[in-house]
Image (spheres, rainbow, N blue to C red):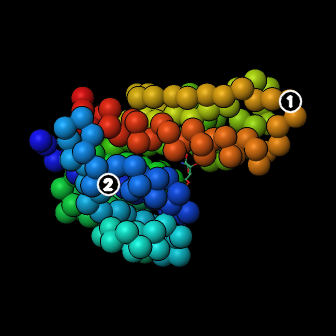
Amino acid sequence: MSVKKIVVLFSGEGTNLENIIKKLHKKVINDCHIQLSGAVCNKENAKGIDICKNYNIPIKIIKHKEYISREEFDKKVVECILSFDPDLTVLAGFMRILTPVFTRHIKAINLHPSLLPLFKGANAIEKSFYSDMKVGGVSVHFVSNELDGGETIAQKCFQKDDNMSLEEFKKKIKELEFEILPQAIVKVLND
Ligand code: GRF
């Protein structure tokens, strides 16, 4: 049996982080023992930090405001990720634009709450909800130098009913995120 280590990067609530812990951490899937060896967060008050503490996941907080440039911040993040020696890094709500300093050194995937290439960047859920699109969806893609632009790994979508509220739309997005991200992680670890 092989052991595969992952690291999760997040900035806020950490609901996807908790979902990964529940579904994948210390689990054997396809003859592979998956371990969440650490997490990195750029916000000292992020709720996800408590989740890490509750599940005994080593967490490192790197405040981006303390770095003079994106590159300097990325250098520190890379150093920190490498100290956990992961097979794969997972961005689950990590709200930073990354530079080549990161992408050159780290094999990473990102979760995005829209059907890419539509609605890249911030406020994707709102942009997608208020658009003319009849479907909403989520994507997981490899992290590249282009924001939300790397190769797509998986996508899931749902019908956007005319009478759906933004809250209902967000709930559906979350539901699909909880399915797609663990599946995509397993897929990439197995490839
Ligand atoms: C998710 O909607 C994800 O798609 C986006 O940021 C959100 C993170 O939510 N990139 P959470 O912190 O996992 O609750």
Q: Residue at x 24, y 29 (%)?
A: 191
Residue 116 in view, yes or no:
no
Q: Residue at x 75, y 37 (%)?
A: 129
Mark 1 lies on a secondary structure that is: loop
Q: Quadrant of residue 134?
A: top right
Q: Residue under circle 1?
A: 162
Kindly give the residue lying farthest to the left in the view shown: 1
Screen quadrant of the N terminus: top left
Q: Is residue 133 left or right of residue 180?
A: right
Judged by depth in the image, the label closer to the viewer, 2 or 1, is 2
Crowding at dot 1, Cα within 10 Å, few <14 / some 14-19 / many 20+, comes out as few
Ligand 1 within 8 Å of disc 1? The answer is: no
Q: Quadrant of residue 138?
A: top right
Q: Which is more N-terminal, label 1 or label 2?
A: 2
Q: Is residue 40 left or right of residue 122?
A: left
Residue 191 in view, yes or no:
yes
Q: Residue at x 30, y 34 (%)?
A: 188
Q: Residue under circle 2?
A: 25
Report the Cα–Cα distance between label 2 and label 1: 38 Å
Observer-nearest residue: 70 or 5? 5
Mark 2 lies on a secondary structure that is: loop
Q: Residue at x 77, y 48 (%)?
A: 167
Q: Is residue 153 left or right of residue 85?
A: right
* 41 in relation to 20, above or below: below
* 153 in relation to 97, above or below: above
Crowding at dot 2, Cα within 10 Å, few <14 / some 14-19 / many 20+, comes out as some
Q: Position of residue 44 (x, y in %)?
A: 48, 75
* 62 in relation to 3, above or below: below
Ligand 1 within 8 Å of disc 2? The answer is: no
Observer-nearest residue: 4 or 65? 4
Amino acid at dot 2 = His
Q: Position of residue 178 (x, y in %)?
A: 52, 44
